[in-house]
Image: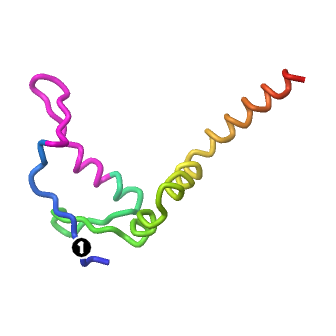
Amino acid sequence: MDELPFYITETPSEIAIKLSDTETWYPIVDLALSLEQMGLVHFNKNRTKFYLTEAGYKQVESGRIGVLLTWFNRNQGVIAFAALIISIIAFFKK
């Protein structure tokens, strides 16, 4: 799995987010750290490269429907709240 590394070098200006006149945020490293916390990537020892894990490869292979299902599995409260709203609407329509 460690055949195709992603390198972290200089932060590209194309994805820079200007927060104020003096402050700019480069989210690429933060995004990579978020993916690491989710178990989708891992870094090398000096943290200059990161690699997809087996879970990361499966996430990529799953496509849009898989991403949607993963989101619903992680946010079950949203589904429960939507079901509650639908139930309340159905109750008052009778």
**Where residue 69 sits in the image (x, y, percent)?**
57, 54
Residue drawn where x is 41% and y is 57% of the image? 38
**Where residue 9 sits in the image (x, y, percent)?**
11, 57
Secondary structure state at the residue bearing disc 1: loop
Total of numbered circles in the picture?
1
Q: In the displayed structure, would residue 11 be above or below residue 3?
A: above
Answer with the quarter of the image where residue 48 lies: bottom left
Q: From the viewer's perspective, is 86 left or right of 75?
A: right
The magenta stretch spans residue 2? no
| Amino acid of disc 1 | Leu
Q: In the displayed structure, would residue 43 be above or below residue 89?
A: below
Q: Nearer the viewer, residue 46 or 76?
A: 76
Q: Quadrant of the N terminus?
A: bottom left
Residue drawn where x is 38% and y is 63% of the image? 40
Q: Which residue is mark 1?
A: 4
Q: Nearer the viewer, residue 38 or 90?
A: 90
User: Magenta part of the protein: which range?
Assistant: 14-33
Residue drawn where x is 9% and y is 52% of the image? 10
Outermost residue toward the right in this view:
94
Q: From the viewer's perspective, is 36 left or right of 91?
A: left
**Where residue 78 sits in the image (x, y, percent)?**
61, 39
Q: Nearer the viewer, residue 92 or 33?
A: 92
**Where residue 31 sits in the image (x, y, percent)?**
29, 49
Q: In the displayed structure, would residue 78 be above or below residue 54?
A: above
Q: Residues within 10 Å of mark 1 (few under 14, many from 20)?
A: few
The magenta stretch spans residue 21? yes
Q: From the viewer's perspective, is 65 left or right of 53?
A: right
Answer with the quarter of the image where residue 94 lies: top right
Residue drawn where x is 63% and y is 40% of the image? 77
Q: In the displayed structure, would residue 91 be above or below residue 64?
A: above
